[in-house]
Amino acid sequence: MKTIDVCLSPELMHLYPVQDKTVVVVDILRATSCMVTAFAHGVESITPIANLEECQNLKLRGYVISGERDGKKVEGFDKGNSPFEYMGEQVRGLKIAFTTTNGTQAIEKSKGAKDVIIGSFLNLNAVAKYLLLNEHNVLVVCAGWKGKVNLEDTLFAGALVDKLKDYLGPDCDAPLAAQHLYNIAKDDMVSFLNASSHVRRLNKLNIHDDLKFCVTPDQYTVLPRLINGVLQLR
Ligand code: 3SL
């Protein structure tokens, strides 16, 4: 039986060899939810970048530059980090360079993996289907917040473990813990997450609609994959 493991923070990545694994990077609030939304609305590619200046420089090469620091759109950037900014005809065909506080850092740290895909509740089924058909063991990398564990990414990991429980066995206790948490929260994830650190952070920034959208399963069927450092649909 193939295995599934969960790395609850990118700071723990040194404990998880990834070279023979499919890594699912998740940052529910909000980086990977934005990426999935953007692809569902027709963007051509997203280049995830850990460093802010490096992302800024890509503007000169024709990229739309997007992202946030501490939840706020970066000054001078074209777009911030709300999924609602990545909808509609105006995003079709764009090449986006994207940098965020945690999500793009987690992608950077996953680059040695056999395969890297982008997960969110919005494309949960597409992720699960891909993992079933793929021959590699799986590691879910939760982006967390500045090295600390967060609830929303853990819930996504739990949802995936739960969905795949008949086909992929847990590799340690983190997948089991995530699955238990998801089963407690699944009927009302919005309320469950209300007290969470990042929801409180977003509330201070007056960002309320994003949470509800980002925990809605299966809005899209797209599956972004990292190919030569660039996220694409292939
Ligand atoms: O850290 C990240 O990658 C972001 O998704 C954080 S925020 O939701 O924009 O604050």
Image (cartoon, helix red, strand yellow):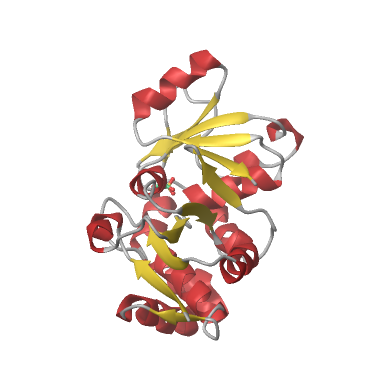
Looking at the rendered structure, the number of numbered marks drawn on it comes to: 0
Residue 35 spot, x, y in % from top left: 56, 46
The foreground one among 112 and 123 is: 112
Residue 9 spot, x, y in % from top left: 30, 60
- Left or right of 205, for residue 62: right
- Left or right of 82, for residue 204: left
49 above or below 202?
A: above
The foreground one among 213 and 195 is: 213
Q: State the residue lying farthest toward the right.
A: 89
204 above or below 194?
A: above
Residue at 59% across, 71% down: 132
Which picture quadrant has residue 78?
top right
Residue 178 spot, x, y in % from top left: 40, 76
Residue at 66% across, 37% down: 43
Q: State the residue lying farthest toward the top.
A: 60
Which picture quadrant has residue 134?
bottom right
183 above or below 205?
A: below
95 above or below 115?
A: above
Residue 168 spot, x, y in % from top left: 49, 79
Q: Is residue 75 visible?
A: no
The foreground one among 116 and 80 is: 116
Residue at 43% across, 73% down: 4
Q: Is residue 41 visible?
A: yes
